[in-house]
Amino acid sequence: KRNMGFLILGPNEIQDLVSMAEAIDAVEKGYAGGHEYPVINAPRRRVHSPAGVRISNFPGGVHDMGVIGAATRADRVVQLEGGENQEYAYREHPIHVLNDSNTGHLLALVIGEPVERTLGYTSLVALRTAATSGVAFKYMVRQNAKVAGVFGSAGQAANQLLALLTVRPGIRNVKVYSRNSDNRRNFARKYAQKFNVEITPVDHPDHVIKGSDAVLCATNTNVELFDGNLLEPGQHVTGIIGGNVQLVQ
C-alpha cells in the first residue's frame, strides 16, 4: 500500500523474497558501512515490564543501500519452572521504519519479519540473526571445514545452520543436541533432507563440540551451556543465546 508517498508493507507481503546468501550480503554491507561511519548504528536497547513484556529497539542504517531508520519489537518472556530456560508466551510483529539516508524522507513502514526463501517461517528474526552469523562464518570458519555442531533444535538453529552451509558448503556432517530428545531427532530428520547433509542427533552436549570445525549455539537457556575447557584449537563458536538474565534477576 502507498500512503503519502511511502510504502506500508504488511507481514504477508514480505515473505519468501530473500535467500540466505542475499541476506548475508546485505548484513555485510551494513557492517562495512558501520565501520566506515560508526555513528550510523547503535547497540540494541531493551526495556522490560514487571509482567515480562520486553521491548527491543534497533536504530541504524546502511548508507550504501540508502536507508536509515529503526525497528522495534515486543515479546512476552516467561521464565520456566526451575529457572534454566524460558519461553515466549507472545511475540508481536516487529515494525521497521525506513528513511532515506540522504534526504530523511520516509520510505516505508514494514510490519513483520522477512523469512528465508527456502525455509519459510521458522522463528522471529531468525533470518537477520543468522545472516549476521553468516558474515562471521564467511571470514572466521576454516575454509576446509567439514563438521559442525549445533546446540538447539528450533527455527534459529535451522537458520544458523543454513547460513553456515551457505558460506561453507564443504560441511557434510552435522551433530545436534537439544535437551528434548524428540526435538533433536526431528531436527535431524527434517533438515538433513532439506539441506542435503548428514545430521546426527547426539545425547550429550560434549559430543557437539568434539571434532567440530564450527559450534553453533541457538538456545533459550538461562544457565551454562557447556564447559569452555572442551573447546579445541581453531574451532569457531557462535552464541545465539536467548537467555534473559534480567528476567531471572
Image (spheres, rainbow, N blue to C red):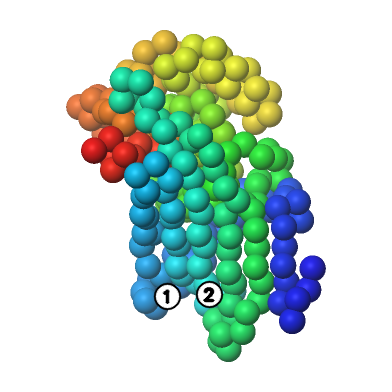
Residue 63 percent across, percent down from the top left: 52, 77
Q: Amino acid at mark 1?
A: Ile
Residue 40 shows which numbered tag? 1
Mark 2 crowd level (few <14, some 14–19, many ≥20, 10 Å Cα): many
| Most foreground residue, 7 or 146 | 7
Which quadrant, please, contains the C terminus? Answer: top left
> Which of the two discs, 1 and 2, labels the residue nearer the N terminus?
1
Quarter of the view holding residue 248 = top left
The residues tagged by marks 1 and 2 sit, at their Cα atoms, a distance apart of: 8 Å
Quarter of the view holding residue 187 = top right
Residue 137 percent across, percent down from the top left: 45, 46
Task: Tell me which residue sits at (47%, 15%) in the image.
Answer: 180
Q: Which residue is mark 2?
A: 68
Mark 1 crowd level (few <14, some 14–19, many ≥20, 10 Å Cα): some
- On screen, 68 above or below 20? below
Q: Residue furthest bottom?
A: 103
- Visible in this render: residue 86? yes
| Most foreground residue, 248 or 210 | 248
Q: Residue furthest left?
A: 229
Q: Residue furthest right?
A: 1
| Most foreground residue, 243 or 186 | 243
Q: Amino acid at mark 2?
A: Ile
Task: Tell me which residue sits at (59%, 72%) in the image.
Answer: 98
Q: Is the C-beta separation of discs 1 and 2 under 8 Å?
A: yes
On the rendered structure, is 121 left or right of 90? right
Q: Residue furthest front?
A: 50
Task: Tell me which residue sits at (35%, 36%) in the image.
Answer: 243
Which quadrant, please, contains the N terminus? Answer: bottom right
Label 2 secondary element: strand
